[in-house]
Amino acid sequence: MSQLELISPEEEAHFRSEGYLLLRSVLSTDEISALLAEVDRLCAQADQTGAVVREAYYHQNSYKLGNALRLSPAFDFLIDHPKYFGKLVSLMGPYIQLMGSEIFVRGAAGEAITGFHTDMGPGLQKVRVTEDSAFLEIKAQLFLTDLSTPDAGNFVLIPTSHRWPVTDSDPLCHIHEMNRQIGPDGELPPGTLQVLVNPGDVLLFPYSLWHAVGPNKVGRTRYSIALRYGQTALRPVERLDAVLADRTRELTPRQRRVLGDFGTKSPSPQRAPEQAELIYGHSLAEAGV
Ligand SMILES: O=C(O)CCC(=O)C(=O)O
């Protein structure tokens, strides 16, 4: 089991104050090619079977595939990828689980692809962690295609908004005060940031960050994979039992634990046994926790 590469003090300070952390060149060229080929295959298959998810608030050329881990073992190595998993553990603590996995496909769009929203529903929209608290939930978004220029279907965020109260919203958690300011051609309000990334870069952000997807005037389809991590005491958004039951997969003990295999000895999600040892990959004393 790989040892964890924890977050640096500078990275943690940036994540806590700005509400995101961009990690460059996490995936190798070979990993990106293999992931893109599998994403392409799954999208073609889902298109034929009608299994793509077109949320009502997406632009018509955009969709997502849910349950990505259930669809293919090709993503298993991403569960605890050494270049970001340790940083997530630093921000959330060892009681961490994978709660869901999605593939985003963002086609050409002359207007914003989604409006600003928070994740995890209206209940958690009312909950914001304190400045020194462990985080409840963090998404890792893995970009597989070129988004190095704006208006290419980029992820858009508002720095520091993860600590702002939301006063005017709806069941889909849209932020009306921001969305009213988006122009008809996808012009974004001041203070927003189109995240410019290369294939293989990874963005970490908590559910409370106000985020959207900008227009895709470049016209090149954007592919990315999002993995949602949360405290083990939270309910996952996806059933991962089928992945755990699939004996053809070669999951490590740590990957099994992150997918919700709490073992047979006192298998409680809130007080999972030997959690820290399994997650850190060595004794607590060695981990310095
Ligand atoms: O990046 C995207 O395409 C959508 C991201 C998003 O809205 C989310 O992860 O909640």
Image (tube, rainbow, N blue to C red):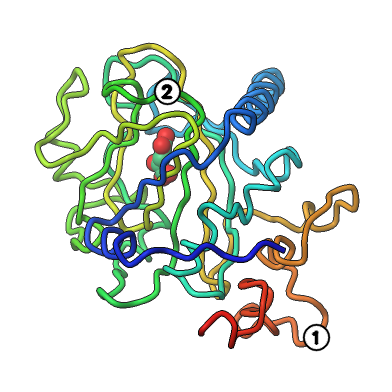
Horizontal relation, residue 163 to residue 118: left or right: left
How packed mark 2 is, by other alpha carbons closer than 10 Å (few <14, some 14-19, many 20 or more), is some
Task: Quickly name the residue at label 2.
Answer: 146
Horizontal relation, residue 167 to residue 9: left or right: left
Label 2 secondary element: loop
As drawn, the residue found furthest toward the right would be 247
As drawn, the residue found furthest toward the left would be 190
As drawn, 267 above or below 85: below
Q: As shown in the figure, which amino acid type bears the numbered disc 2?
A: Asp
Q: Position of residue 288 (x, y in %)?
A: 51, 83
Label annotation for residue 242: none
Q: Quadrant of residue 102?
A: top right
Disc 2 within 8 angstroms of ligand 1 (CB): no
- Residue found at x 54% / y 38%: 225
Proximity of marks 1 and 2: CB atoms separated by less than 8 Å: no
Q: Earlier in the sequence, mark 1 or mark 2?
A: 2
Label 1 secondary element: loop
Q: Position of residue 42 (x, y in %)?
A: 68, 27
As drawn, 79 above or below 108: below
Q: CA distance from mark 1 to mark 2?
A: 46 Å
- Residue found at x 23% / y 56%: 18
- Residue found at x 30% / y 44%: 211
Q: Quadrant of residue 269?
A: bottom right
As drawn, 100 above or below 3: above
Position of the N terminus by quadrant = bottom right
How packed mark 1 is, by other alpha carbons closer than 10 Å (few <14, some 14-19, many 20 or more), is few
Disc 1 within 8 angstroms of ligand 1 (CB): no
The front one of 235 and 88 is: 88
Task: Quickly name the residue at label 1.
Answer: 265
Q: As shown in the figure, which amino acid type bears the numbered disc 1?
A: Lys
The front one of 158 and 8 is: 8
As drawn, 289 above or below 137: below
